[in-house]
Image (cartoon, rainbow, N blue to C red):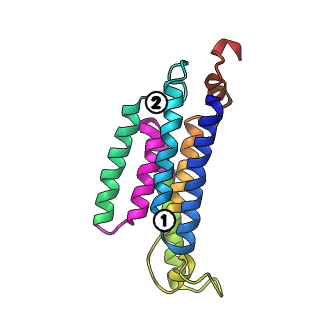
Amino acid sequence: MILFLVIFCVLTALGFAVASAISDFRSMTIPNIYSCLIVLAFIPAFAADYFSGQGMEYFAALSSHLLAVVLVFAVTFVLFVTRVMGAGDSKLCSAIALWTGLSGLAPFLFYMAIVGALLGISTKILNKRVVFASPVAGGWIDKSQKGQAGVPYGIAICVGAIIAFYQLGYFSPEKFALLAGYTENQF
C-alpha cells in the first residue's frame, strides 16, 4: 500500500511539473495551483516513508528537504525581485526542491540551468528571425518572434526535476522493493 501511495505521489508531482512546462510554453505563465499540488503530493509520500516501519528508505531527512526549499526560495526570490525569473518559476522551482532535498539539489539545478540556457539561446534566435509561420498567439514562440525576451523556464525546471528524481532513485526498483517491505537480503 505504501509503495503505491509513494509512486502515485511521485507521478503526481512530475505530472504537475509537466503541466507547468506545457503551460509556460503555451502562455508564459505557471498556475500557482500546480506548485501547490506538487508540495501537497510530497506530504503523504514523505509521511508514508517515515511511518512505514522500514526506516526512511526512500527520502532523506525532513531537514534536508526543508533546507533545500529555503535555499532555493531565497535565491529564486532574489531572481524574481531583480526581474531575472518569474514568480511562477520561483514557486515551481521551490516546490521541486522540496522533493529533491539537499542530496538532489545539485543535479536538479545543474540540468535545469543547462536546459534554461538552451531555452535562452533559442529565445535570442527567435528574437532575430521568424522561424514559425503561425505560432500559437501569446505563447513563447509567438512572443519571442515579436522580440520579447521571456524564457519559459518551467520547461527547464521540469527537465531538471525528471533527471533529479531519476538520479535520486525515485524510479529505482530497489527503493520500490524496500518500500514494499523487502529487505536488501531478499532481492
Dot 1 crowding, Cα within 10 Å, few <14, some 14–19, many 20+: many
Secondary structure under the numbered disc 1 in the rendered image: loop
* Residue 114 in sight: no
Q: Is residue 127 above or below residue 103?
A: below
Identity of the residue drawn at 54% across and 75% down: 140
| Residue 91, position as x, y percentages in the image | 41, 56
| Residue 53, position as x, y percentages in the image | 53, 18
Find out whether residue 91 is within the magenta segment: yes
Q: Is residue 102 left or right of residue 144?
A: left
Overall secondary structure of the magenta section = helix
- What is the total number of numbered labels drawn onto the structure image? 2
| Residue 33, position as x, y percentages in the image | 48, 59
Identity of the residue drawn at 32% across and 61% down: 79
Secondary structure under the numbered disc 2 in the rendered image: loop
**Where does the N terminus fall, quadrant-wise?**
top right
Badge 1 is on which residue?
Answer: 30
The numbered disc on residue 186 is none
Label 1 sits on what residue type?
Ile
Closer to us: 141 or 122 = 141
Kindly indicate the quadrant of the structure image that contains residue 184. Answer: top right
Closer to us: 32 or 102 = 32
Span colored in magenta: 82-111
Outermost residue toward the top? 185
Q: Are marks 2 and 1 in contact (CB under 8 Å)?
A: no
Q: Is residue 73 left or right of residue 141?
A: left
Q: Is residue 50 above or below residue 144?
A: above
The numbered disc on residue 60 is 2
Which of the two discs, 2 and 1, labels the residue nearer the N terminus? 1
Label 2 sits on what residue type?
Ala
